Amino acid sequence: MSAQAFRSIKDIPLEEYFTPGHRACQGCGETIAVRHILKAAGPDVIVVNATGCLEVISSPYPYTAWAVPWYHVAFENAAAVASGIEAALKVLTRKNLISGKKIHVVCFAGDGGTADIGFQALSGALERGHDFLYVCLDNEAYMNTGIQRSSSTPYGAWTTTSPPGKVKPAGQMTYKKDLPSIFAAHGIPYVATATVAYPLDLINKAKKGLEVEGPAYLHVYTPCSPGWRIPSEKVVQVSRLGVQTGMFLIYEVENGQLRLTVKPSRRKPVTEYLKMQGRFRHLSDEDVERIQRLVDERCAKFGLPPLEAST
Amino acid sequence: MTTDKPTVKNLPIAGIIFVPGSAKEYNTGAFRSQKPILDAKLCTKCGMCWVYCPDGAVFVNSEGMYEINLKYCKGCGICSEECARKAIKMVDEEE
Amino acid sequence: MGKRISIECAHAASLAVKLANVDVIAAYPITPQTHIVERLAEYVANGELDAEYINVESEHSAMSACIGASAAGARVYTSTAGQGLALMHEMLFIAAGNRLPIVMGVANRSLSPNLNIWGDQSDMMASRDCGWIQIYAENAQEVFDHTLQAFKIAEDERVLLPVAVCFDGFHVTHVIEPLITLDQEEVDRFLPKHRKAVYKLTPDQPSTWGPVAGPDIQTELKVQNEWALNSSKDVILEVWREFGDLFGRYYAPLETYKVEDADAVILILGGFAGTGRVAIDKMREEGKKIGLVKLRLYRPFPIQEVKDLLTRVKAVAVVDRAISAGGLGGPVYGDIRNILYDEEHRPKVLSFIAGLGGRDITVKDFKRIGEKVLDVAAKGHSEHKVDFIQVRI
């Protein structure tokens, strides 16, 4: 593995390419991630943003929170738009029509824009091998339209379209689509997961994804205060607990080799993560046990320690 | 930023915004019901408040100290929650 | 000098795109458009054209990639048909609204259901309000010339709009016809070798494209687009004139045939104008005062030219290869009738729908249409009625 570009907080650039004055909710998880990913990219970047929270909160005319070139086209096609930009930069550079400096192409999309409506466009762009970084900001539902379930919503989560009821007691009755595995299966050079509680891990992965030749996929778990029914100040804490309980597995897949980059030495029970969030409040003991069992199985596969003994 | 409503003729082509980061002119401090108070004596300059601020409202001032820009701070309380030294307290706006 | 060759019309489009020295092509295969992009893929593969060819996974992504590439400053081409155009529909509006000079060939094809790969114009008519410049070509020469001209029109700083060059699937695309080509040197005298993008995504001057627009500016943005499309007509005429001066082939928004003393005319878009002219000749031999109008420029609509021409006749038969669902007849019929409504000497306007899903429109059909419209011209009376040609009830 190459040396980490950012070894400490002090190495993170002070420049903000995603500026203050954006209209995200208090304690927005994804804006933390976006700030740092852009710091990793620096000024020579073109950003493509799928429709969603980030697009809406950052660009109501005439105010833009983007200090770098930014393009929003639609919901489902950020990866296709990025494909075109990347191809244009490549050919215009080859024809000496633009300066030869490296310009990164970065996509931001939510879980809906990635797991659902933008899935095909992303799969196509990855398969074609465009040199770009695709960032999925996964807050596990369609938050921009008012908290509707996506295929990235975890089992047991309340959303406005997966409400718990007599027939469907758990709310979301299906299991979260495993996007990083799917995109790793495309055989692209770099796939990683990250979350906002571990900013150095996040920013170094963004840097690596930008630097590899070819497509890179970065999946960032970004807690959403209104959507997850958590107080705004708990956003980073819940992100950390997601990792400590094994709900979020933080790893990278480089040239096919998977490596956990944040590995909790002891694993906490999932209830600690679930009980913090109003979206899981309705869950029965059986549901919680089921989630625990699934997390245990997945953690075992990834070589994480077993659940710490309950006291 | 002009306060006049743009017209067909003076609206930039396709509504493109040609001023990078113009949102800096927008006051998001109005979102706030509580504000963070940073006790400089307790601060170890670890930078975690700066790192975790969703709004880029924490900055390093000319003395090299972290400071919170209340024009942008929405009062989410993450900085206070994450500060290992408990150097940031959230207080009600009216106080 | 360019030479006279035989070429499949689809390949005439490919040749024009190669001579236009495009930077990026993004396309998805769909009949009857495939021959255009297959040939382009060959040009790129064998080094005759230095471009990035993006083999996208859908037409929606084709137009999306074109949008991205064009916003980054590239000269861009794509081509599609029927279902492909329908899948692009959402992106067509964004390409126009974001003022991107993309050029697209549309091999007009019927829309499903039922699956039908053959020609009619229901695909483009369903997208006619997308804000694109829309030009209909009839043969290899027009396909070639209009495709080349499209880049010059689209990229003009006074325009900055995408252009669709439409031609009938199979009845035009797959037909081998004579073509007077242009050599590269001639094309270079007409069209700048490279696009000079006035606005583009670049870190040198960061700008925010596609920001959220509230009720306070959406109206102004839409009107801005409408003005841009309307005023593009002057540039289109200018470019056509310049092309004519250079190469001797002049084009106009309307092409007329034997209309000078006509009592009635048949108006049509696209390749069947050729059959129509044969029918006109036959009717003229029978002493009937009838002519034909081919509408070349569909959007921006040549309002004044249409008024000037059609107020001189007593009746107009509009032949549409598409239906405007719900009893209104054909879409072009609606446009023509609309624009003539306030005229003091307005002709009667009749709607005929023909040639759906690749069905031939024969000389006999045109003659029957001609007789009906001449009859209305003589009687001076008509009513709104949609006449479906060759339909078995």
Image (tube, rainbow, N blue to C red):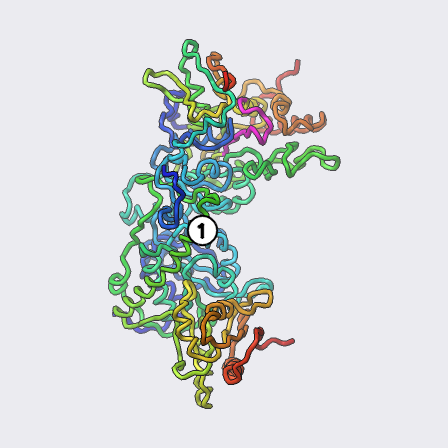
Using the image, name the chain to which the residue with label 1 belongs: C
View extreme (top): residue: B41
Considering every residue shown, the one lying at the far front of the view is C344
Quarter of the figure with residue A104: top left
Quadrant containing the C terminus of chain A is top right
| Residue C41 appears in the figure | no
In this picture, which residue range is highlighted in magenta? A219-233
Q: Residues within 10 Å of mark 1 (few under 14, many from 20)?
A: many
Mark 1 highlights which residue?
C94
The picture places residue C270, in percent across and down from the top left corner, at: 44, 71
**Residue A76, image x, y percentages:** 51, 45
Q: Residue furthest bottom?
A: C286
Between C54 and A135, the one nearer to me in the picture: A135
- Residue C25 left/right relative to A196: left
Residue A285 visible to an observer of this rendering = yes
Based on the picture, tell me whether residue A64 belongs to the magenta stretch: no
What amino acid does circle 1 point to?
Answer: Ile
Residue at screen point 43% across, 76% down: C311
Q: Quadrant of the N terminus of chain A?
A: top left
Does the magenta-highlighted stretch encompass residue A228?
A: yes
Q: Secondary structure under badge 1?
A: helix
Which residue is at the front of the view, C369 or C393? Answer: C369
From the viewer's perspective, is residue C33 above or below residue A284?
Answer: below
